[in-house]
Image: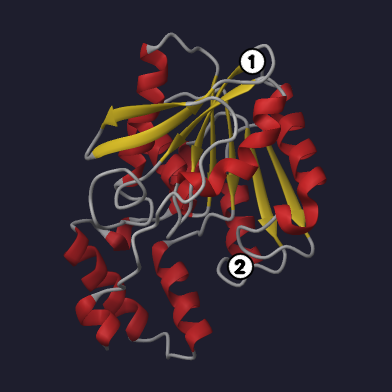
Amino acid sequence: MQLLFTGIDNPRPRNTTLPTHPYSTVLIKSNINLECWYIPALAASRGTVVMCHGYTACKSAMLERAEPFLQNGYNCLMVDFMGSGGSGGNSTTVGFKEAEEVADCYKYLTQQGEQNIYLFGSSMGAVAIMKAINDAHIQPKAIIIECPFATMYETIAIRFHNLGVPTFPMANLLLFWGGLENGFNAQAHNPVGYATNIHCPTLLQYGERDDRVTRSETDRVFASLHCPKQLITYPLAGHDDYLKKYRAEWGANVVGFLSHYN
């Protein structure tokens, strides 16, 4: 009941780790002011990857994932979403308003003359990418998305289930009040619907031990994609932790995928 009336009070994610490679801090104006890091590739540039973090995280959480891209010729633009790290705001909409921020990062890169733009996102970041393509009609060369939920209702319901709290009516109430308090239509926040409007090459990745997103959700998102697509699963990985057991394999998979679309 406290969740319904006061919301979830997560500490603001802070960037406690800095890049080990030369980088610059970039400020991008969006629905709030975004703080980003731009890290040049360590080899001849093949394009730029916009890296989008998950819920309760910030851009420093993407540093390990950035390494294979940097080593193989991809610049990285790492963004703090609203309410995270050095960006403005104090709330999150789990990918809804963050989609506008993804689109503005994409537009920033096009204004800098970058023609080969790729998007990478995990969990909430993946959802924000999907909605950005659906809403703003941006055209990245390819995207890599990891463990996006299928609908906002389902991601709330599975969290109540994991807490041992009855899904009905609690998930329905939180869906309504959470959206109302944060100024967005949570009921309409459905990545499986966004997927139908994605036409660029897409790599979807999933950990088979994910306790926050079901395999059924992943299969529905994948089936809804109308584009060149690939699904890779990691049998011993959970939610958003593929590098723990599959670091080398993960790096080879993401770089191998992008290499087809240079």
Foreground of the two, 100 or 65: 65
Q: Is residue 32 visible?
A: yes
Q: Secondary structure at mark 1?
A: loop
Q: Position of residue 233 (x, y in %)?
A: 75, 54
Residue 33: give its label: none
Q: Is residue 137 visible?
A: no
Q: Secondary structure at mark 2?
A: loop
- When the figure is inspected, residue 149 is found, relative to residue 42, above or below; the finding is below
- When the figure is inspected, residue 203 is found, relative to residue 247, above or below; the finding is above
**Amino acid type of disc 2?**
Thr
| Left or right of residue 115, residue 128 in this image | left
The residue under the point 51% across, 41% down is 18
The residue under the point 67% across, 56% down is 206
| Left or right of residue 38, residue 173 in this image | left
The residue under the point 58% across, 37% down is 226
- When the figure is inspected, residue 141 is found, relative to residue 86, above or below; the finding is above
Residue at numbered disc 1: 46
Residue at numbered disc 2: 214
Work out whether mark 1 precedes mark 2 in sequence or the reverse, and give the earlier one: 1
Q: Label 1: few (<14), some or many (≥20) within 10 Å? A: many
Q: Quadrant of the N terminus?
A: bottom left
Q: Quadrant of residue 57?
A: bottom left
Foreground of the two, 98 or 227: 98
- When the figure is inspected, residue 104 is found, relative to residue 13, above or below; the finding is above
| Left or right of residue 80, residue 207 in this image | right
Foreground of the two, 121 or 20: 20
